[in-house]
Image: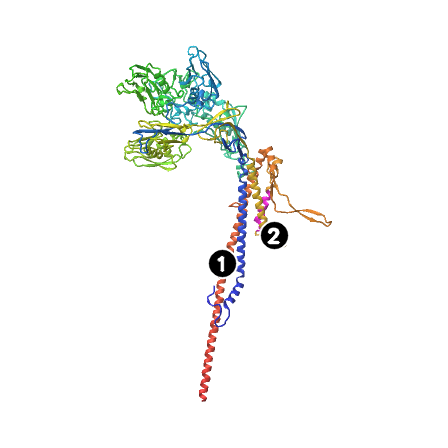
Amino acid sequence: MGTISSGIGLISGLDIQDLVTQLMAIESRPHELIKTRIEGITVQQTALMSLQARIMALQVNAASFNKESVFNQKAVTSSDENVITASASNYAACGTYRFIIKRLASNHHFISRGYSSLNSGVGTGAITFEIGNGQLNRPTELSFINGQQGFERGEITITDRAGHTGRIDLSTVLTMQDVLAEINKNTEVQVTAAVSGDRLVITDNSTGAGVFSISGAAAESLGIEGIAGADQPHQIIGRDIVYLTADTGLRQLNDGNSVRGLGFGDDLIFHRAGEVESLFSLDLKDTLFETVGDPDASNTLQSLNGGNGVRLGKFRITDRNGKFIDIDLNELTAEYGPRVTLGHVKEFIQQKIDEKNERDNPSSDPDFKGMSISITFTGTDHLTIKDNSEPVIPEGEAYVRAEDLKERKSHFIIEDLEGGFTAADLGIIGDVEGENIHGENIWRMDSLGDLVSAINYHWSNWDPTAAKADKRYVIVELDQDGNGLSITNNTAEALTLEDTAAAADLGLVNSEGFTGVFTGRRLIAGLNTVLLSSLNGGSAGSNQITTEHSINLTDRSGQSVQVDLTGLDTVQEVFEAINQAATNITASVNQAGNGIILTDDHSPAGGSIAVSGDLAEKLNIAVSAGEGLGRIDSGNLQLQYISEAARLTDLRAGRGVQPGKFKVTDGDGVSKTIDLFRDDVKTLQDVIDAFAGSGTNLRARINDTGDGLLVYDEISTGGGAIKIEEIDGHTARDLGILGTARQGENFIDGSYEFKLEMGGGDTIEDLAARLNQADIGVTCSVINDGSGDNPYRISFTSLVSGRVGRVYLDAGTTNLTTRTLASGDDAIVLFGEGAASGAVLITSSTNTIENAVKGTTLELVGVSDTPVDISVAQDLDGIIAQIKNFVESYNSIMEDIAEKDRFDPETLERGVLFGEHAVDTVRDVLQSVVRKTVPGLSASMNSLSDVGIRPAPFGTETATNEQNEEIQYAVVTTPKLEFDEDKFRAVFAENPEAAAELFTKAETGIGDWLADRLEGLAGSTDSTIKYRLDAMQSQQNMLEDRAEYLEVLLQSKEERLYQQFYAMEQALASLQSQQAALASLSSLAASWAQTTRA
């Protein structure tokens, strides 16, 4: 601070710096006191923030106490973790579950023939890959047979005519192909199993004279139990085991392509034959609907609940003011008969409420608070009933108080009366505190029965002029064979049915007109086959696949025959018709599995096959004799497996399409963003609609091959290339439409069939690199097996496990051939007590199985025929661990408080927060935890002490009294908690619900109560410690301002002292100079005096 470089006065010799320092030390005492106070506040702040952090840690430990899930935690053990491990959520039911792991899921792995070098080629042509689909001999899932009820697993016993008996275990088969394989590989009996249409055919190849028989519950469920008849002693033809029921899912129809168009305008449009104007049309929405102003145009009550309708009767609506109205829907039948709709119900309820309000308010008091109920259902599958009533002003009050808004007189209640079921059938029974009752699902469009009911009870399927008791225009039901639908025309005139998407997919298109009963085409294929209508991308026909119902065959020997194909619907039926014809031509599925091959192995060499006819053209097997072919391969017939109804989650072999955004640009350069990250985007139809509403000229549809989405430019004239780019995620890639259209094309084809065009210069390494780059779900590598001349092979592995991930390769005209190393199988698990017989079979495409038992996740590790027990029990140890953490955290806080708030009367030493009011508050609140009782609970289970959480006992000390006797004294120590684990276990075992409710009861339970108190103590806003820290900070800021002011003042004083000493030195120097001058003058005077005397 000083301005004099030397501390010693030059004239005075004083130690000026020391003098100033001592003087300033006296002056600085107030400043130092303030600094000490600031330091003290800082220490207090640090200590208080440390306490706040501990309380927040306690809050974290106690945060889960108000969650029921904490007290429902489950612990899982496996009797053999080398075979299966498991975990469980809170929703898993406690118990022991037994599993036998028969097979693990695997990835399809296949390998090519050998090649001489890495530069070897595979020839020219296209190689195609499809994952999980595209096969004409698609194996029928056994879960689909017997009306989708599956079959009874176990052994079948076959005795052939030679007297041999074979027992064949079918307990783990999944498909009909598996059944055929198990029977045909048996060596104990000489039989052959095959499929024909909807049934199994078992042929006895032995030559004995005995009786050919098949027995067993499994055989009966496969339709083959019995004894061969005398007319065909060598063969047992099973019964029909493939048929539809009302429960058949729409997604299972049309080879899994479902039914298109539902919910997108009129689906079934009927005309009188020869008339253009429609007689009536049916919009088969997949949600409930109403037409404003026309209550007739709504869902009929008969169509609800899958056609089971609504049982009419009385029900009561009570609003939150306690007012109620009784509704009797029987009154509607007098006016509307069986055509009562939800629109009528909505209108009727409103009418009854209006009438009640008029009765209750005869004077038309404008302040009258009547009932106000609204009903909505359009676009959903349920009714929502809303109580719009306003709170009633309490007597003696001028206005509605805030507490009246929270606590109304009654719950909002809807209940049936007189033992009826009307409200239950409408799905609206409820008792809620709030204003909405969200009903249960009463409308479904998932099964064939749902769809048939929607047609039969549709509001517009009604002829008011009809003289019949049943005034419906048409009635739809399952046909006699159970393979499709039939329509009964109730009118006196012929009707036609337009070729809409829904009509085509339901097999009901009829342009010629019909009276009486019209039977549509098959909606499901037979065993191990597909529908003809699914070929050529689904464009092979909707009702009849050919205008000519015959095909002309000529084998190599010149034999010709015309084969009648009338009424045939499946590929297998065509095979059987050809194979049974009087030629040597045999039809079967080609090697790639995606087409048809015709061969003639019995005619003399030299001739050629000739095939003609409309169907032959459609199946790509039409050839003339002049082409000189001894065999005919149709190539890929493009089985449709993608339709508008396809769910996005099912695409890409079950991997699904990630929701996201992508940018589309049409040929005119207009770019827009398409957002598929919405809850209402579920199917490819939703994606198609998104393109239509994108604001560009781009549109989307299912491609011509039925295996993907096609994006095309509808009307652009700019000539630019259309382009699709990702914005958020990889949605466009998953849909197969990412990229830019090729030059000269105005479309992008998102086919899931990947095609590699191989040129003459392409090598096996090129094939592997291009396939890996395509990222289609198949990895490829070239290996060297070290063998002789052809050691290099191409290894292909599917990235998708299970059957759904099987890769179907069509090598085309190339020389690529492959063999399977691992077939790509589903995991097979048997669930149930005892032996495998009678157990439930569980399958999974992966080795992780979720919710086989609700709430559990099984991880399959190995295979074993020994049952493995998975035990699910209450995770009491987990709950106890959380309570222990809470108690430890609590005690840590109390110890911290004791340390920071201590006072030693002997040494007068104080803790850093001694006397701090906020600390006292924290201690009081925490101590109140053990005294807290939860209202509304049993007195035996309403406090923490009831579950073993109680105050720790006082400490003790030993002393000697006047009689010299040792006495123990209770000594007050830091208040802590202790946890009696044994008591908690006993209480929880006896009544776990009551123990859990102590913690989890809303608002007043320990969990909510403690969370609220701890937040009030240490929360980041509006808490005791926050307020105290803010006050400390304000005080500290004020003191720092004062200290800063004093520091400036002290600096000024110090400078003034130095200036004063400096002035003193100058004065002394001046006096010294004067003294020297006087001395000089005195000397001159003396000298002059001497001179004068001389």
Mark 1 crowd level (few <14, some 14–19, many ≥20, 10 Å Cα): some
Residue in the picture at 49% in, 59% down? 1045
Q: Is residue 140 magenta?
A: no
Crowd class of label 2 (few under 14; some 14 to 19; many from 20; radius 10 Å): some
The boundaries of the magenta stretch are 913-928
Indicate left or right for 395 with 721 as reference.
Answer: right
Image location of residue 879, percent across then percent down:
56, 37
Residue that label 2 marks: 903
Residue lying at the far left in this picture: please name it: 626
Total count of labels: 2
Q: Quadrant of residue 127?
A: top left
In the displayed structure, would residue 427 be above or below residue 1083?
A: above
Q: Nearer the viewer, residue 191 or 2?
A: 191
Which residue is nearer to you in this view: 1032 or 197?
Answer: 197
Q: Is residue 996 above or below residue 290?
A: below
Picture quarter with the C terminus: bottom left
- The residue at which mark 1 appears reads as 1044
